[in-house]
Amino acid sequence: MTTIARDARIAGAQRTYPPRSAVVSWIFFDWAAQPYFTLITTFVFAPYFATGIAPNPATGQSLWGFAMAAAGLAIALMSPVLGAIADASGRRKPWIAGFGAVLVLASCTLWIGKPGDPSIIPPLLTAVALASVGAEFATLFNNAMMPTLVPPERIGRLSGTGWATGYVGGIVSLVIVLGLLAANPETGRTLLGFTPLFGLDPISRQGDRAAGPLTGLWFIIFVTPMFLFTPDYPAKRPVREALHEGLSELKQSIKGLPQQKSLAAFLLANMIYTDGLVSLFAFGGIYAAGTFGWHTIQIGTFGIMLAIAGAFGAWSGGKLDDRFGPKRVIAGSMLILLLALAAILLVDKDSILFIKVAPPTPGGALFAAASERAYLVLGCLIGAAGGPLQAASRTLLIRLAPKDRIAQYFGLFALTGKVTSFIGPLLIGVITAVTASQKAGMAVLVVFFVAGLALLMRVREN
């Protein structure tokens, strides 16, 4: 592994940055990690779990919400501590490797998810939660490498390009699953009209289940360039010393937050709107499966369209970030998300904004119903806004946080992104379980975006 020499600030020496190959290799981390979010938590495995493994979609949405809540709580408790240790020890890659291994092993375990077998639900949800922990922590330490790669005025473009590349990776992985692996159980054909590769059985939903192992293999292949070509910080001190120093610095940072009003307001806003965004993405496919009766091919096609919108939004959002600042990008993205979510709640299979329309015809053409097309448009708006929101959030943190404790503050960033992240899925799960209504469960997310936007208005960019 290569390392970055400590800044030579003697006589105003100008900082140097690694070559383009190092930056491109770092960007491909987002490509490597994205299939977990695209294939497992959003468009393939989560809807399959709700409609093929759980007793019914509402119960599936509820159980999935509880699993995501447990993972979010674990991430919230551990993120700032791990970030502080990483800053004190100086290394990022060992942490990425360790949590990447958790992601890979847990994702591969999802192959056991046979349809109609309730006994498999507890270990399956445990694996999903562990994969979430691995993906989030690996991402935390990858984010902390950003300030060492490009000058400050290019951070927004780097972040946006990373998110856009991740979305493209998600699209490619989704096309592979839908076009070559997952088939309609009734026709035995994939979206592209092929029989599944490797003899995967459509009846036992092996194509859907293969999303787990594919996610693990994908991560191993595409994260490798980052380990080979992107420089890491040099080791500063042993782990035990780093633990003591890191926890001490973390304590001081938390105590100092009241004096850093903009940073504190941003972290609080991030805590709320990230919870809403993650919950919206996590349950969007499940909601569509229950509302329209979509299966893997319909949901996956919708996912491809949403990811294309997300890639374009993240890329353009990165350019807007450098030009207008991340705060404006975040605020604009949240307004779009809020309006799109409110509209989605007024779309049902036989109505759009209280106007009656013809419902989807069983066995009919793909997305032939007006309500389905309305859902597609609104979903693409959510995808286009979600990418810039997440990319600009990490660049705003870099602008606000002390540069010598960036991993620690990314830990706090992850903490605020996860400390209440169990609340969104938990509320969706509880409200859905109590009302037996997916729409009622999703409606709670409106509050998250309104509150997050109000808090963001109190943030001043440096």
Image (tube, rainbow, N blue to C red):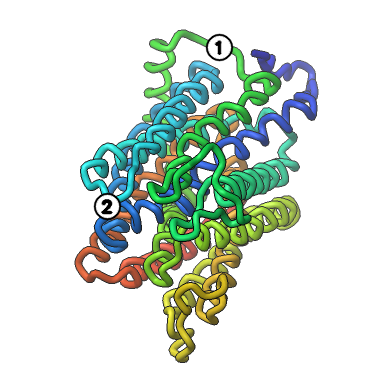
Q: Quadrant of residue 402?
A: top right
Viewer-side residue, 390 vs 302: 302
- Give me the C-alpha separation between circle 2 and circle 1: 42 Å
Q: Position of residue 270 (x, y in %)?
A: 47, 51
Residue ranking furthest to the top: 238
Q: Which mark is residue 63?
A: 2
Q: Which residue is mark 1?
A: 235
Q: Which mark is residue 40?
A: none
Viewer-side residue, 281 vs 52: 52
- What residue is shown at x 72% (from left), y 31% (from top)? 23
Q: Position of residue 279 (x, y in %)?
A: 41, 56
Viewer-side residue, 401 vs 90: 90
- What residue is shown at x 21% (from left), y 42% (from top)? 119
- For label 1, the crowd category at 10 Å Cα-Cα, with few meaning under 14, some 14 to 19 and many 20 or more, is some
Amino acid at the residue labelled 2:
Leu
Is residue 286 placed above or below 13 in the rendered structure? below
Q: Is residue 443 left or right of residue 170?
A: left
Viewer-side residue, 14 vs 40: 40
